[in-house]
Amino acid sequence: MSIISEVKQRTDIVELVAQYVPLQKAGRNYKALCPFHNEKTPSFFIFPEQQTWHCFGACGTGGDVFSFLMKKEGIDFGQALRILAQKAGVALNPERADKAEDKEKEKLVQVNEAVTGYYHSLLLDSREGEIARRYLAKRGISGETIEKFRLGFSLNNREAAKQYLMNKGYEEKDLVKVGLIIEKEGGNSYDRFYNRLMFPICDIRGRVIGFGARVLDNSLPKYINSPQTAIFDKSTSLYGIDRAISMVREKHSIIIVEGYMDVLPLHQHGWQNVVASMGTSLTIKQVDVLKRLTKNITLALDADIAGKEATLRDGGVLSNLETVVYSLNPDKKLVPAPGWILSGLVESENILDAEIKVIPLPPGKDPDEVISENPVLWQNLVKQALPIVDFAFDVVVNKIDVNKAADKSLAVQKLLPLIEGIKDPFRQAQYIERLAKELKVSESDIRAHVKKSRNTGRRRKTNAGSEQSRFSRHLVSSAIEEYCLALLFQYPELRQLSQELVPECFQHTENHELFTRWQHCCDISHLENELDESLLEHLYYLLHKDFPPPVLESDKERQLVFRDCILRLQEKLARTLEEEGVDSSQQLKEIFLRRTKRVK
């Protein structure tokens, strides 16, 4: 029996959930007020026989003991496994816990922690740090905030940090690996950060994994970050997440700004559910972190610049019209965010069952300026944050001439894909009505466009980052799920066919986690590097799973078997949704009908 299965069998979901909410008996099952949203009538049910839970209210989600703990505590699968294993008295593999790779990562974290203390002392006490202290005072950053975020200063000396750490017994090779020093061709090395204000970047557990650094003069670049290392990935990290996590859980919402110096004053004024994307567009990996904490996500954007980008010019729309979610580089120039356009945000709302809003800031103002000059204004702006589609309407419709047919056509081209992507039919109908009214066109014409788009299949997309599977039926992993994943992992050429799969097809947490992470990896070796040690055992089991001969002797036979696995998983999901009283998507119903006809 695998460790995951053993933990499942030794953990009672009723006892686990009862630690968080009072339970009421409901026949053979239990019910409670949902711990993930506010409600007056219990819609959260626990099914002891299946060891699963499901919210039939606003959440509409469910799962097993792992998914409950992950969602409630905002942790990943590995952390949930370790917590439940400890409670169940199941020993995790000590050999794997002591792997050289894990020791290496821990060593790099220790280097970062040591240099954080060094930079912090220089900021507080050194004569050279006076320039940084004056800058922070000018920006209104208090001593308490400096301490809380462990801000620091790097000397104007290209070997100061290197010498300090080596005198403390750290090896030069480790300083290179963690990105603190840069090697020259001749074998010499020097500090990456010097004469800069230092911002330690922490993971969700508060461990320093990298640094951001800002110059205090007019030199360029104004900001630099640690390079990607074994412990730091800018696309995954969010500045201030360790300080924000408690308030995010309390307020059930998170606000995303763009830079370090936006986070500090907002926290100082009591807005401690704020994090920064560190000058980059929001990434799928960052959303994967956020979705475990909250589904209420708000982005702070500069309305003036977004508006300029949406201005119609020369009879056409700027190509960046779709790129309303963007980042500003240190020189206040617009940096487009390809891949995270408005239509992508609407899809993410559907995938995460989340609400994404936008705070259009006053022209030329950053969040830190607004909060410092007028805290009441900032509070009102947050309250008035617009749903992402409403923001798109404001940006597009307000910049066109509704009396010009060409402008109307362009507005429809830009807004209709967003409206089509809305899952809720009532909300979609509301925006269709609004678009028709704004453009002074027939509502039936807009609906005809939507219907035509559906018929041509342009809206059929596979959800690449879905939430935890809705229902988990058994204590042990599903044979068909394992068979499908084993095929996928052992025969990489099947990857193209897997586009018909969505993560919800894997209703057991360990299989769901592996499939979801595999979607964002280029190959198995990359996947291994991304996994917590707790999931590696399951991956290795699937990689060595035997298949009965002679079915898989040829590529054609493997493809046929894999397609059959996909259909079986889709059929299983459709049945599960219907049994739980949830309307399965039209696509899944069609798949189920096709399979039934084929079998007959």
Image (cartoon, rainbow, N blue to C red):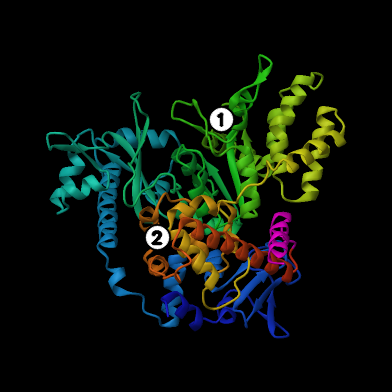
**Three-letter residue code for mark 1:** Lys
Viewed as shown, does residue 53 lie left or right of 223? right
The secondary element bearing badge 2 is classed as loop
Q: Which residue is mark 2?
A: 531
Q: Quadrant of the N terminus?
A: bottom left
**Three-letter residue code for mark 2:** Leu
Viewed as shown, does residue 205 lie left or right of 299? left
Question: Depth check: 541 or 348 in front?
Answer: 541
Question: Depth check: 379 or 344 in front?
Answer: 344
Between tags 2 and 1, which lies in front?
2
Magenta segment: 583-600
Label placed on residue 217: none
Location of residue 20 in the rendering, given as x and y in whole percent from the top left corner? 58, 74
Location of residue 252 in the rendering, given as x and y in whole percent from the top left corner? 61, 57
Viewed as shown, does residue 551 lie left or right of 453? left
Location of residue 504 in the rendering, given as x and y in whole percent from the top left corner? 60, 61
Earlier along the polypeptide chain: callout 2 or callout 1?
Answer: 1
Q: Number of labelled discs? A: 2
Q: Which residue is mark 1?
A: 365
The secondary element bearing badge 1 is classed as loop
> What residue do we see at 43% from left, 44% from top?
142
Image-quadrant location for residue 188:
top left
